[in-house]
């Protein structure tokens, strides 16, 4: 059974996709993508031999070895022109940005990212790449908040507020994100009381101002 975060990623994979899954771990997402008639073919990569060995066992047990190609590789090193969808789930946001940023994206049309942290780093891909955020979801699982970001080929200029909190999520105003921003607001307020240096306070004050602005807009809406 897939976790809620992987189920959310799966929901964004379009039927007939030719999928490329980076950091596949045990290949749970590729297996579900093929079994549910979403992915036509999958190339799944992991740079660790242990998880990849388990992935091979899982794929074989599901009878999908002909449709899921497993590789000991990293990033976009095995990307080819047949791929139209890329998924990366569970890696850090800055790692995802490093994997994707400035690379030849070939014929990939859709990217589905589930960063383990720093989702703003993923959204920053729109700065220097022909990518735009088209959808986002926030999932709460085991008291942890996960963000899923869907990007497609396009042009987009995001404000700092949109990078931090998501252009789509700002419109959706999901309750889990509201609670998280309230928590961050309280944390920043307490932290700022203990920082005497003005230069060190400025970026924290700016983030606090943006959080307060978002929460005010949501409360007014």
Image (cartoon, helix red, strand yellow):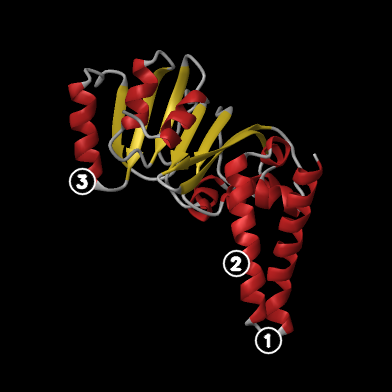
* Circle nearer the N terminus (2, 1): 2
In the image, 216 versus 49, the foreground residue is 216
User: In the displayed structure, would residue 184 be above or below residue 204?
Assistant: above
Q: Which element carries disc 2, helix, strand or loop?
A: helix
- Figure quadrant of residue 155: top right
Q: In the image, 140: left or right of 205? A: left
Return the x and y of residue 198 as percentages of the image width and height: 74, 82
Crowd around label 2: few <14 · some 14–19 · many ≥20 (10 Å)? few
What residue sits 54% from the left and 45% below the top?
A: 100
The quadrant of the picture occupied by the C terminus is: top right
- Up the image or down, 50 lies above or below 131; here it is below
Quadrant in which the N terminus is drawn = top left
Q: Horizontal placement of 97 versus 174: left or right?
A: left
- Drawn side of residue 50 relative to residue 39, left or right: left
Q: Which mark is residue 50?
A: 3
- Residue behind mark 1: 196
Mark 1, secondary structure of its residue: loop
Counting labels gives 3
**Label 1 vs label 3, nearer the camera:** 1
Q: Residue at x 60, y 50 (%)?
A: 179
Q: Assess disc 3: are there few (<14), some (14-19) or many (≥20) residues with their C-alpha within 10 Å of its C-alpha.
A: few
In this rendering, would 184 be left or right of 72?
A: right
**Position of 71 relative to 216 (above/below):** above
Instruction: Compute the Cα span from label 1 to label 3.
Output: 47 Å
Q: Which residue is mark 2?
A: 187
Which residue lies at the image location 40% right of the left edge and 45% below the top edge? 142
Q: Position of residue 215 (x, y in %)?
A: 73, 51
- Where residue 132 sits, quadrant-wise, is top right
> Of the numbered discs in the image, which one, if any, rests on residue 61?
none
Residue 115 in sight from this viewpoint: no
Q: Position of residue 82 (x, y in %)?
A: 47, 23
């Amino acid at each position: 059974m897939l976790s809620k975060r992987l189920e959310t990623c799966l929901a964004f994979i379009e039927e007939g996709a030719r999928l490329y899954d980076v950091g596949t771990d045990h290949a749970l997402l590729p297996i579900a993508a093929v079994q549910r008639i979403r992915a036509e073919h999958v190339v799944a990569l992991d740079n660790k031999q242990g998880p990849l060995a388990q992935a091979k066992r899982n794929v074989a047990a599901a009878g999908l070895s002909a449709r899921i190609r497993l590789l000991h590789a990293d990033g976009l090193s095995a990307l080819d022109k047949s791929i139209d969808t890329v998924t990366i789930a569970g890696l850090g946001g800055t790692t995802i940005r490093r994997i994707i940023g400035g690379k030849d994206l070939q014929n990939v049309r859709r990217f589905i990212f589930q960063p383990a942290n720093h989702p703003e780093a993923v959204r920053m891909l729109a700065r220097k790449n022909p990518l735009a955020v088209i959808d986002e979801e926030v999932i709460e699982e085991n008291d942890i908040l996960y963000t899923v970001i869907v990007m497609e080929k396009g042009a987009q200029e995001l404000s700092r507020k949109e990078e931090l909190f998501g252009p789509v999520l700002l419109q959706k105003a999901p309750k889990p994100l509201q609670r998280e921003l309230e928590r961050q607001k309280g944390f920043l307020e307490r932290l700022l009381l203990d920082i005497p240096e003005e230069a060190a306070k400025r970026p924290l004050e700016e983030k606090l101002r943006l959080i307060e602005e978002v929460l005010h807009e949501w409360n007014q809406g």
